[in-house]
Image (cartoon, rainbow, N blue to C red):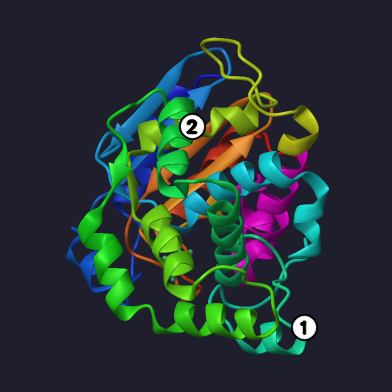
């Protein structure tokens, strides 16, 4: 497969694409990004790498970080994790409140905000310093010790995080948050503020494309059954109320973030990370989805 040629074609084609998405502004710090940034990085299981555009520039990975939080929680708790949240697509926006009330404070899945807040709560209960453990894990799987939280983004979200505060309080009233609300929000906001490039994200997500084994050291970090379950959750819940659309158009497990990043995984083949800050109405990168759709269409490869 000539991935470089395919990426060149996608880059050329998308120069003409009418990108009428909007940069996220409900976290004010995110709205400062240059809306025209666009990059992609493809990391193949053979070790070959292909990229174009702003693929080495770090951006706010936001909800993509929920995959890392989930991985740590699955390692810590095993199956008892699923008493605290479900594994069903929500069909609703990532920050929706009403389903959570109807379902007694049990989030539909770990990727909507309520689910990720419960994961933060678990990490606080299980680790002495959860933020350090998140950083340690991400640095390890990406091989980049310089990866860090973006303090300004974390503070900006803290000042405007009224909906997440409401979700956490609602779950606390049902007994599904054990620690202090502010502590839970702090871990969640810092996790979301992680700044990474497409290149670093693609490398980190090779863990999920390579059955839980680090490609370079051959070290088994995660059991294959856990990777299968994380990939299943990315497939069914990774794009909130657009999970069906992503499966239909792209056909790979993936996860998006409101910073405009998307990572998709082709098990045993590659991981691909794309970044374009302008979002569609469901909060997913408009150009990012288009680029990944063209990647799986041109290669003729998807998991289906
Ligand atoms: O909690 C929030 O609203 C953000 N920190 C993350 C949301 C997000 O990335 C949704 N994904 N598209």
- Residue 165's place in the image compared with 298, above or below, is below
Instruction: Report if residue 292 lies within the magenta region.
Output: no
Q: Position of residue 22 (x, y in %)?
A: 32, 72
Most common SS among magenta residues: helix
CA separation, marks 1 and 2? Answer: 34 Å
- Quadrant for the N terminus, please: top right
Q: Position of residue 135 (x, y in %)?
A: 40, 39
Task: Please tell me in which quadrant of the rendered image residue 169 appears.
Answer: bottom right
Q: Quick one: SS at disc 1? A: loop
Looking at the image, tell me whether mark 1 or mark 2 is earlier in sequence order.
Answer: 1
Q: Position of residue 162 (x, y in %)?
A: 40, 84
| Magenta segment | 228-254
Q: Quick one: SS at disc 2? A: helix
Residue extending furthest toward the front: 128
| Quadrant observed for ligand 1 in the rendered image | bottom left
**The residue carrying mark 2 has its beta carbon less than 8 Å from ligand 1:** no
Residue density around tag 1, few if under 14, some if 14–19, many if 20 or more, within 10 Å: few
In the rendered image, which residue does mark 2 sit on?
204
Residue drawn 44% across and 46% down?
Answer: 129
Foreground residue, 187 or 101? 187
In the rendered view, does 58 fall on the left or right side of 220?
left
In the rendered image, which residue does mark 1 sit on?
103
């Amino acid at each position: 497969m000539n991935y470089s040629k395919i990426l060149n074609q996608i880059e050329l084609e998308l120069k003409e694409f009418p990108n009428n998405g909007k940069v996220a502004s409900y976290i004010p710090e995110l709205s400062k990004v240059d809306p025209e940034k666009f990059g992609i990085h493809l990391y193949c299981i053979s070790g070959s790498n292909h990229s174009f555009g702003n693929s080495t520039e770090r951006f706010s990975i936001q909800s993509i970080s929920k995959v890392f939080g989930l991985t740590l929680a699955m390692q810590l708790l095993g199956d008892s994790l699923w008493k605290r949240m479900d594994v069903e697509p929500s069909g609703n926006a990532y920050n929706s409140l009403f389903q959570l009330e109807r379902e007694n404070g049990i989030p539909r899945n770990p990727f909507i905000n309520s689910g990720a807040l419960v994961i933060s709560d678990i990490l606080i209960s299980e680790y002495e310093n959860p933020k350090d453990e998140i950083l340690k894990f991400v640095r390890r799987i990406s091989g980049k010790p310089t990866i860090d939280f973006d303090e300004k983004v974390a503070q900006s979200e803290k000042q405007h995080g009224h909906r997440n505060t409401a979700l956490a309080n609602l779950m606390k009233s049902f007994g599904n948050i054990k620690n202090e609300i502010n502590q839970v929000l702090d871990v969640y906001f810092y996790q979301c503020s992680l700044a990474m490039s497409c290149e670093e994200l693609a490398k980190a997500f090779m863990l999920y494309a390579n059955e839980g084994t680090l490609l370079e050291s051959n070290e088994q970090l995660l059991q294959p059954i856990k990777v299968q379950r994380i990939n299943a959750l990315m497939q069914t819940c990774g794009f909130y109320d657009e999970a069906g659309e992503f499966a239909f158009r792209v056909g790979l497990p993936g996860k998006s973030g409101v910073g405009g990043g998307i990572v998709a995984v082709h098990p045993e083949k590659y991981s691909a990370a794309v970044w374009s800050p302008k979002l569609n109405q469901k909060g997913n990168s408009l150009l990012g989805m288009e680029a990944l759709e063209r990647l799986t269409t041109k290669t003729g490869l998807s998991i289906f």
